[in-house]
Image: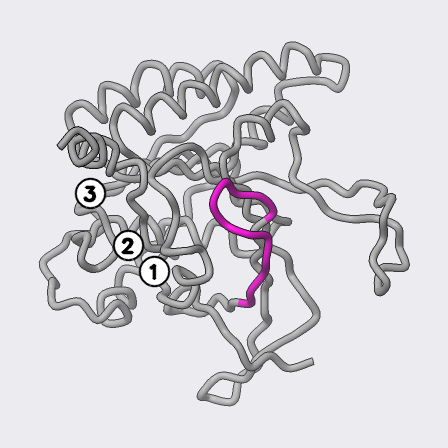
């Protein structure tokens, strides 16, 4: 009886949120965990925001369809929020998801906040977010991107101060995930470093890694990284579509591995037959 009660109490820690593509969900072991911080790192234009927008829709579906029957909060720190792209996905997503529930008002369940600096981000995560989560049903928080504020607000010589602020923000996001049972997605930029152990096909001696260093990496539960690669697929219309690679860099319950996906008008979806 005690074991059963404990399992029920902590069941939310193992809930998973669909990313809106069954094959990608399978690759991720069922989806994105509703616990800790999941980071999606990648270069500009690789598909990070596209995946986040798609999850803002999938979270609104009932659990039987991989969602959480809840809304989302999108904290935007870099560019203008891609509202036109979101509306395009809303038009395509219901039919793609094969759900009988067509009554969901997707656009009404996404709360958008624009943040320009670290102080504003702290006010948001320590003040505004707890109030909103206490009043509204929210299952997903996206910060796009965490590097947008921390790279802009600090000089290299301020690494100690920056690390302190990152730990404060990261710690609060972990507390919100635990208290309100929400999935936390933090988008990150990437940087190029010297690779001391280059692979056989790597003649550059360099590799791309997530930005913000070890101080932020220690706050991340699962790190995913997206890369643009020199491959493509041909769609049903005969159009060549660029392929991206999604990697699990580290995770407490998933092995490191990779898969391929494309971004189309209908959203993000995994692919297998990739052209060289």
**Magenta residue check for 247:** no
Disc with the residue nearer the chain's start (1 vs 2): 1
Name the residue tied to disc 2: 58
Q: Which residue is outermost to the front?
A: 1
**Which quadrant of the figure has residue 66?**
bottom left
Name the residue tied to disc 3: 70
Identify the element where label 3 is drawn: loop
Identify the element where label 1 is drawn: loop
- Color scheme of the displayed model: one colour
Question: Badges 1 and 2: C-beta atoms under 8 Å apart?
Answer: yes
**Which quadrant of the figure has residue 9?**
top left
Q: Position of residue 76 (x, y in %)?
A: 44, 35
Number of marks: 3
Name the residue tied to disc 1: 20
Q: Label 1 crowding class (10 Å Cα cut-off): few <14, some 14-19, many 20+?
A: many
Q: Residue at x 47, y 38 (%)?
A: 144
Q: Label 2 crowding class (10 Å Cα cut-off): few <14, some 14-19, many 20+?
A: many
């Amino acid at each position: 009886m005690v074991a059963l009660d404990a399992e029920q109490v902590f069941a939310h820690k193992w809930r998973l949120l669909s990313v809106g593509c069954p094959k990608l969900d399978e690759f991720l072991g069922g989806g994105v965990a509703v616990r800790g911080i999941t980071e999606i790192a990648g270069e500009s234009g690789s598909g990070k925001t596209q995946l986040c927008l798609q999850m803002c829709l999938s979270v609104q579906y009932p659990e039987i369809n991989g969602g959480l029957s809840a809304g989302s909060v999108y904290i935007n720190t870099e560019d203008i929020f891609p509202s036109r792209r979101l509306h395009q996905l809303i038009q395509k997503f219901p039919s793609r998801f094969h759900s009988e529930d067509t009554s969901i008002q997707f656009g009404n369940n996404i709360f958008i906040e624009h943040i320009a600096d670290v102080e504003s981000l702290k006010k948001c995560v320590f003040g505004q977010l707890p109030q909103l989560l206490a009043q509204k049903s929210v299952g997903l928080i996206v910060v796009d991107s965490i590097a947008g504020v921390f790279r802009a607000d600090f000089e290299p010589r301020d690494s100690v101060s920056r690390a302190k602020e990152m730990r404060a923000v990261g710690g609060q996001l972990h507390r919100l995930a635990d208290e309100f049972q929400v999935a936390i997605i933090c988008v990150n930029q990437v940087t190029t470093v010297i690779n001391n152990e280059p692979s056989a096909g790597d003649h550059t001696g360099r590799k791309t890694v997530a930005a913000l260093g070890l101080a932020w990496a220690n706050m991340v539960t699962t790190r995913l990284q997206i890369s643009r690669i020199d491959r493509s697929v041909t769609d049903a219309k005969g159009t060549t579509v660029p392929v991206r690679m999604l990697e699990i860099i580290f995770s407490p319950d998933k092995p490191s591995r990779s898969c391929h996906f494309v971004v189309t008008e209908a959203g993000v979806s995994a692919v297998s037959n990739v052209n060289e």
